[in-house]
Image (spheres, rainbow, N blue to C red):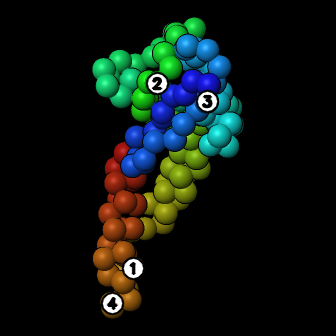
């Protein structure tokens, strides 16, 4: 049984994938890592880099030799990028629509409370609203 040591860039220790043969394809390695880590292919993709040479494996048919150590990074998959872009555009539309309404209602600083409980938080919210109004 051959093995490859892998570690996510945010982790300290390596885990092991076991397979038969002298090498494993990049696709098979990704599939095994995703299975072990309980990741769904639709949610993300994995970027695999050789830990010693820092070479990134990009070809899905790349052969990774047994005994290698690799660094794994989660990256957005191409299908989730499209979905997230559509969702973020809708969220921006709603956020800017709400800020327009607030900006059109806010006429002066006289609406500021005299002694808010959390002055820093209130000031930050006010600055963000002003920035949103200026952008629009």
Reading the image, the residue beneath label 3 is 18
9, 36: nearer the viewer: 36
Q: Is residue 30 visible?
A: no
Reading the image, the residue beneath label 1 is 111
Give above or below for 98 relative to 42: below
Q: Describe residue 34's horizontal placement relative to residue 99 as left or right.
A: right
Reading the image, the residue beneath label 4 is 114
Rounded to the nearest angstrom, the CA distance separating label 2 from label 1 is: 67 Å
22, 119: nearer the viewer: 22
Disc 1 secondary structure class: helix
Crowding at mark 3 (Cα within 10 Å: few <14, some 14-19, many 20+): some
78, 4: nearer the viewer: 4
Query: Which numbered circle lies on residue 67?
Result: 2
Marks 3 and 1: CB-CB under 8 Å? no
Location of residue 49 in the rendering, given as x and y in whole percent from the top left corner:
41, 24
Rounded to the nearest angstrom, the CA distance separating label 4 from label 3 is: 65 Å
Q: Is residue 125 visible?
A: yes
Q: Nearer the viewer, mark 1 or mark 4?
A: 4
């Amino acid at each position: 049984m051959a093995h490859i040591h892998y570690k996510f860039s945010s982790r300290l220790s390596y885990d092991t994938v076991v397979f038969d043969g002298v090498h494993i394809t990049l696709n098979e390695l990704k599939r095994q890592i995703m299975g072990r880590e309980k990741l769904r292919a639709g949610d993300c993709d994995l970027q695999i880099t050789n830990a010693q040479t820092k070479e990134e494996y990009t070809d899905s048919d790349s052969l990774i030799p047994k005994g290698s150590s690799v660094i794994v990074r989660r990256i957005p998959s191409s299908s989730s990028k499209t979905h997230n872009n559509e969702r973020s555009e809708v969220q921006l539309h709603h956020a800017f629509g709400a800020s327009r309404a607030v900006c059109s209602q806010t006429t002066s600083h006289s609406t500021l409370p005299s002694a808010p409980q959390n002055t820093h938080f209130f000031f930050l919210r006010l600055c963000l609203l002003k920035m949103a109004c200026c952008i629009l």
